Every structure is written in structure tokens, then in C-alpha cells.
Amino acid sequence: MGREINFRMHQIAYLEAFTSEIMSVQVARKIALAYWGFSKTAKSRASSGTDIDIIKGNGISDEVPAKGFEGKFSSLVDRSWSDYTGHVGGYGRIPFETLLDFAIQVKTKEEHIGESNMDEIRKWATNMINNNSDYFVARAVYKNKKMELLINTKP
């Protein structure tokens, strides 16, 4: 009897974690839809012909925390969420163009303007979503324009 109860408790814990992750992906999708203006309501579909990919981290954090410019970048993003929070739901969303500005900002020293590119931002964002289960990346192509967004589903 005790074994069966223990097994049931493990099943329930697994289902709760699985359901929570699915709900977070759905929340991230709705945030992206609203941010890009594809949806005026909280529905989970974009207009026909618009594909939105939600990328979730692999859940394996780096053994060594980010250092150098990447560490400064991650800290700046973590401190900036309140400036990039939506009015409905209070979820954070930062476009990759802004993340590029953040990277340049952390690399700039005195009169030397730092340089960065979207490939570096994608790499650093991937590390961030791997290290934080509340972070997602949304990607879409609309009218031949690639759009990317870092999302924080923790209000």
C-alpha cells in the first residue's frame, strides 16, 4: 500500500511539472502574439501564414556561470525586465534588437564603442534560457522579416 501511494505521488509530481512547462510555453506564445500585434485578444493563434516558434531551454545550466561580457550582459538583462514588462499579465519581453544594444553597451569602454552581432546575441540568449526555466525565445518570420524576442514568463 505504501509503495502504491509513493508511486502515485511521483506520478502527480511529474504531471504537475509537465503541465506547468506546457502552460509556460503557451504563456510565452501568447506574449509573443500580443507583443508583435498578431493577436488583440489572449488567443493562442496567429493569423494564417504566420509561424511562431517558442524555444525552451534544455534545462541543463552551465556548470560555470557566465563571465566577462556575457555575464555583464546577463546581469543587465536581469536588471532590465521591469522596463520591458507588458501591461497585461506583467510578463517581460525584450526584442533581440534591444539585446544587441545591451551587448554593445556592456562591451563599450570609455571612447571605444563595443561591437556585437545577432549570432552572439542568439548564443547568449540560448545560454540564458538554459539557465532560467522562466525564459523563452520566440521566433517568427513575417513579411520576410525575422523577428526574435526574449520572454520572461514569471510576472
Image (cartoon, helix red, strand yellow):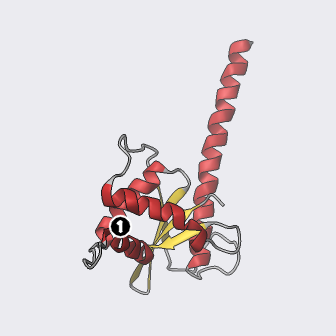
Q: State left or right for residue 68 relative to residue 28.
A: left
Residue shown at 40%/63% (left/top)?
Answer: 73
Q: State left or right for residue 127 relative to residue 22.
A: left
Residue 131: percent from the left, percent from the top?
45, 49
Give the farthest residue toward the front: 110
> Which one is nearer the viewer's eye here, 33 or 48?
33
Query: Where, by quadrant of the figure, is residue 39 drawn?
Result: bottom right
Q: State left or right for residue 155 relative to residue 52.
A: right
Q: Quadrant of the C terminus?
A: bottom right
Q: State left or right for residue 126 relative to residue 91.
A: left
Residue 129: percent from the left, percent from the top?
46, 55
* Residue 57 visible, this angle: no
Q: Quadrant of the N terminus?
A: top right
User: Label 1's element?
Assistant: helix
Give the farthest residue toward the top: 1
Residue 74: percent from the left, percent from the top?
43, 59
Q: Which residue position holds label 1?
A: 121
| Type of the residue with mark 1 | Ile
> Which one is nearer the viewer's eye here, 54 or 122?
122
